[in-house]
Image (cartoon, helix red, strand yellow):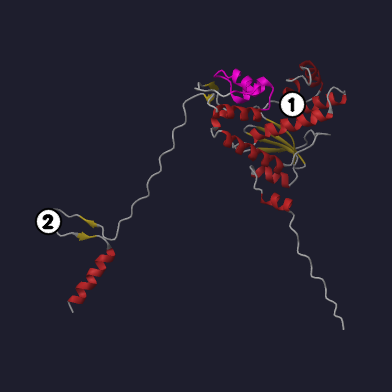
Amino acid sequence: MTVATAEPPRLPVRDRAVAVERAWGGLSPMLTRLAAEKATGVLVREHGTLHLADGQVVHAESPLAPGLEILLTAHGTLSTETWRQAAQRAEDRRGAAHLLLAAGRLAEGTLQLCHLVALYDAAYFVLAPSSTPGRFRYGAVHRPGALRPVAVAALERETVRRRDLLHRIWPDPRLDSAPLVRTDTVCPPRLTVRRQTLLDRVNGTRTATDLARALGRQAFHTLVDVRRLAAAGLVAPQGPPPPPPDPPQPPPRLPSADTRTTPADDSPAVTTDPHITLLKRLRDALEAL
């Protein structure tokens, strides 16, 4: 007689992507909550704004990062006059870019690339630690159309990766915001044309983001170059160096079991340890029996 055995149920397989998504805590609890509820509106923070549509970031702006028009006009992709005319007809930068795209003055791939570059660049500063709380305004935003939105978790992970990269190159965050000065070194290294051009613009008044805007470069990539120049001993932040950290204090010494106080002159020593005092009392009581 053959007994049919039922096949045991398969164990559930955990989706690694979902697990990572749940484990990610995020840089901004408010932004994480807005992404979860698929909110639409504008998140305003100390160093810029993020525009959300259905919980995804469709645009980012920061005064510390060059805008889309600088990335498009600085190196000849568009002329400044062409952009100016489109901006006059549109409501904002994205509207001007779409007008140029529809008129055939701008390739779709170029616009996609510059849009993502500008978004990640500005978001790095928007998501920086802030001294003031953020606020969110619900409402319709200009949707990107053919432009690709970015998930909040992906944007935050890239921001963390960029922070770690800068710290590994040269761990002095003052280089990101202070005016930069050139420093003398005994044996300066040979620089690439890109870094030499950046070093030539350092004059004691411009910050790294000022240099990025003047050269039409991404702000974060300029921060990377500045930190590499600092690591080579060629630039430094303007102003006095930060005070050195306090030296570590030795741990307090606990009194030993035989610690005694020294009485005045020829008086007998007094034991301060309560355990020894108790033992002596027991000894005296036993001797008195």
Q: Give whichever of 152, 201 is nearer the camera.
A: 201
How many marks on residues?
Answer: 2
Q: In the image, residue 167 lies at what x, y percent?
A: 57, 36
Which residue is farthest left?
266
Q: Dot 1 lies on which element?
A: helix
Residue 131 seen in the figure? no
Which residue position is annotated with label 1? 68
- Magenta residue check for 5: no
Q: Quadrant of the C terminus?
A: bottom left
- Magenta residue check for 192: yes
Question: For the point 78% across and 28% down, which residue is it?
Answer: 94
Horizontal side of 229 relative to 258 (left or right) equals right
Residues shaded magenta: 190-218
Q: Give whichever of 247, 131 is nearer the camera.
A: 247
Horizontal side of 235 relative to 252 (left or right) equals right
Which residue position is annotated with label 2? 266
Displayed quadrant of residue 205: top right
Horizontal side of 87 relative to 205 (left or right) equals right
